[in-house]
Image: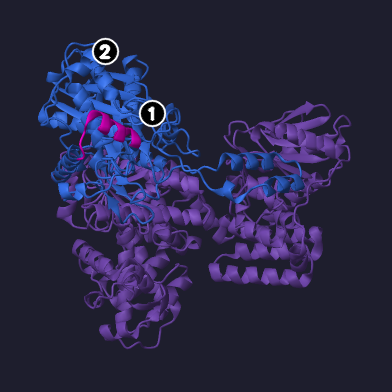
Chain colours: A purple, B blue
Amino acid sequence: MSAPPGQSVAVRREMQDEVAVLVLDLPGESVNKLSRAVKDELAERVEALIRDPAVRAVVLISGKADTFVAGADIEEFVALRSAEEAFALSREAHAFLDRVARSPKPIVAAIHGACLGGGLEIALACGYRVATDHPKTVLAAPEVQLGIIPGAGGCNRLPRLVGLPRALDLILSGRNVRGTQAYRMGLVDELVPPPILRDVALAAARRLAAGGAPARRGRRGLGPLLLERNPLGRALVLRRARGMTLKRTRGHYPAPLAAIEAVGYGLAHGVERGMVREAQLFGKLATSEVSRRLVEIFFATTRLKKDPGVDPPAPEPKPVGHLGVIGAGYMGSGIGVVAASRAGVTVRMRDADLPKVGRGLDAAAKVIHEAQRRRQVSWREAERQLALLSGTTDYSGFARAGLVIEAVFEDLEVKRGVLREAEAVIGPDCVFASNTSTIPIARIAEGASRPERVLGMHFFSPVHRMPLLEVIAGEKTAAWATVTAVAFGRRMGKTAIVVRDRPGFFVNRILSPYMNEAGHLMAEGVPIEAIDRAMVGYGFPVGPIGLLDEIGLDVAEKAGRVMHEGYGARFAPAAGLDKLVAAGRLGRKSGAGFFRYRDGKKAGVDPEALAILGLTPRAAPPAAELADRLVCAMLNEAVRALEENVVRSPRDGDIAALFGIGYPPFRGGPYRTLDVLGAGAAVESLERLSARYGDRYSPAALLLDHARTGATFHGRGR
Amino acid sequence: MNAMNGRRVAIVAGVRTAFAKAGTVFGDLRAVDLAKLAARELLERAELDPAEVDAVIFGQVVPSVLVPNVAREVSLLPHFPKNIPAYSLNRACASACQAIASGHDEIALGHADVVLAGGTESLSDIPILHSTRMSRLLTEAAKAKTATAKLATLARVRPRDLVPVTPAIAEPSTGQTMGQSAEKMAKENGISREAQDRYALRSHQLAAAGTADGRLVAEIAPVFLPPSFDTVVTSDNGIRTDTTLDALAKLRPVFDRRYGTVTAGNASPLTDGAAAVVLMSEEKARAEGRELLAFIRSYAVAALDPGEQLLMGPAFAVPVALERAHIGWKELGLVEMHEAFAAQVLSNIQAFESRRWAQERLGRSEPIGEVNWDTLNVMGGSIAIGHPFGATGARIALTLANEMRRRGVQFGLISVCAQGGMGFAMVLER
């Protein structure tokens, strides 16, 4: 629907000499996003300017502080009901941008801030692009992350501008490109400081209108010629991209493959036919289940970021400018370094003696130096981050901390001890967090002088890579403490969910029956490779047995025991882990577990492990059967956890499983999987499994409820 | 009672790195690194919100050409907001004392409430210069408009132009090195080799005791040495725990090989290190309920003709500082004298105790005071602990303030001699 004529909604027109400046400035929004209405209005404006004899050239610029265009309006996108509708939408965008691209009057894009998705596609259609060198200026084509492809000409225009390999890289990774990089690869024609952006764009527009120098065309040389300008080289690049993509997505995600096809087709058959193909592929993907799941996850994480972690009215989080970490071991130093590098706070790490502190600082420095080696940070920034960390053997520097996280040995008395010591020095508003995976927070908080500021912050290992944080609110934990921990976890770049103080919290709670079931399968003689392959096939990044090796068999065994104690027979682990632990096989960290490791790489199942376990593998059952057994155990437990309010919502549970376990994103999370499958079908599966394998598969009451009433976990909406 | 004008200023906390002989454990660290390490640990130990710091002042005697204002680099640590002004100063070996004095003045005047003052030096990281001719040729070449002209200029470089110039610790006005000046003082004041060696031995023994019982270690921030942080430097490495008078007597004089008495054993070594203190207005410190180490009661600086006895400055500064403090020498419970050379310490003590010197040089009828050896440099001094020029003053203030607290002493004196014929004295009070 277009705006009534003369009544501009989102686009402002300013004249400067004979150049028209179109200022995109969506009212009531903090960023510009593209809806059909905005697109129509923009198209109308451009059309009018092209016809206006007083106008010689056009500059397109944003009225928002730090966004050019942040992308398409996703709410509008998810409302698409059919492939035809989506195809039509894409073709409309093509028509508009074709008009822009073929405009007889030069149209210059002046880019400052985020220029993403559809925003980038508009810029690509313009005859000239000027961008600022400001760090906020990022260009990206993130469509595949939502299960779609650029559908407004991006698949066709991008490779023609920056070359095939770069275009594929941008579209397949969706990664952000800063101004300098964009300039170097020819994505933009000029790079300028923000204050002169408008003037430079105007000057460029005038120059082009006067028939001046055409846009800079960056890439020259033999490489591109050999690779992309001939069908053979092109086919080679495309084939390699397809191979790598298949390896990465294991066929679960159609969008990257479709993007490769769209790009390849456009180069082979020309822009016009290429655009049609792009629209067809876009249309097919736009309403696909995978895209729906990925968009749901996008919405869920976006909303989670704004969720304070407690029910309203939520208190304000206390400011944390200084962090105390007790225990400079693997977890402690990991927490410290992420707090310093991501949250930017000063970190005081304490351990029993100076060499331990030194090892912690070393581990932290290694994380920072790795980022420096990958050019994610400059050496100056690395030095700055390092300076934020300091170590001690006493509690000096703790009095000022807004948050203290202990990551000492997983032992109740040790943890109570450091809590007691810390409470003697920390201020009244300081939150005390225990990084534990197995010990109930309530037990740690017993005897605390202020139990209301004690909670759990369960980080996953390695801290600098794993995105999830479980904040465990104990019975006595005050809301202000919970929101402070959640807010700080987010500053550390973590996806934080608040969970109840029940054994295993949420992630280990639902992981445990799944791992146990893998153990049972193994005990039944199912080959380890078959179990892992089945789950990787289901979409997990690693199979359960491989995961045991990663976690550490000793850690897993201990956790298994705690869960068994906490929940009884349902969580009885299969025998075996203890035997391997006793044999000193602790998984990857000890160089051997269920698998062998050579040069740090997994080198197959170790026959020695099988011998210790007394296993003789038999023929493997079908993968689907294996996956069904394992996944059903996890899903059923997830429902029980929800019954007990271990997570605050199915949304939180889904996100926790995705980010904490690597639950396949295209399946949306355990609760989403159940919704898609239907509670009835899930109950049927569980009853069948229960008849064969026993009570541990008895369907959860809430699931039976849902099966009866037809209710879903996520309700009707998203 | 405030003996000076303006608000009363307290030293609330202090810390230093260990002092290490140049070219040893801190060989890979720059002076700015040492300064930052000390400042970071100081913030932690003082439990000080970095945003409350109003100014940062650091002393450095041999600044790096690449980091000319080391204090500003400290105040640009990510701990601080970016808007904390900072400056570096050079009052030779009294630089860190001067940083404390200048910080005191800012607070006393009400221009600041909290000042981070200290000093740093790395004699492992001193600038090595090109010869004057070489510098000129390089400048000319850089200005040359054509490649040929550039080459022609550079072609004029002769091998001897390439010999680097290492800055010597010499008086520009007299050309005499510090050591030569100490030699001169020893001879003119009749300070024997044995007296010097005995003094040096005392310094080492007391510093060893102060290290063993933890008093010196308590003021030291452990330095985890990059890149792997597995070596932790927690104590000074110049202290010779087991040296003897015999061993000291065997050393050959360095500056006058035939008739000299000044040796490497009875002089302070070239040292790397940094030290810093937090200064705070009394009212703020009290409002925060802080435990105070000491107040700054008074200070004074003096200078004399470098052509006479170069390191006699303290004998001129001390009486003025005492006068400004409205106290007599006898009221001092502890005295910390910087030990550049044993000959210098003993020469100044001679002057302190001499009626004639007081009459002739100060125009006073009475001598400054008699030294009580039980209260002088009770944990040794720069000869044993080391002497990073820019940092020593803050080290001495810190050592003194800590010991005043331990002993419950009311008044303590700092005395530092400095290049250029200067002397610095400060009275601390509890």
Dot placed on the residue nearer the N-terminal end, 1 or 2: 2
Residue at image location 33% in from the left, 77% down from the top: A594
Q: What is the crowding at mark 1: few (fewer than 14 residues within 10 Å), some, or many (at least 20)?
A: many
Labels 1 and 2 in the same subunit:
yes
Magenta span includes B186: yes
User: With B387 as the anchor, is B367 left or right in this view?
Assistant: left
Q: Place residue A168 in its image quadrant.
A: bottom right
Q: Secondary structure at mark 1?
A: strand
Q: Kindly identify which residue carries mark 1.
A: B56
Q: Amino acid at mark 1?
A: Val
Magenta span includes A313: no
Q: Kindly identify which residue carries mark 2.
A: B4
Residue at image location 23% in from the left, 78% down from the top: A583
Residue extent of the magenta highlight: B180-193
Figure quadrant of the N terminus of chain A: top right
Q: Place residue B198 in its image quadrant.
A: top left
Give percent across and percent down for residue B65: 50, 38
Of residues B44 and B258, the one drawn nearer to the viewer in this rendering: B258
User: With A497 as the anchor, is B293 left or right in this view?
Assistant: left
Q: Is residue A649 above or below residue A107?
A: below
Question: How far apart in space, not on screen, are marks 1 and 2 (Cα)?
Answer: 22 Å
User: With A37 as the anchor, is B344 left or right in this view?
Assistant: left
Dominant SS type (magenta): helix
Q: Can you tell which of label 1 and label 2 is closer to the viewer?
A: 2
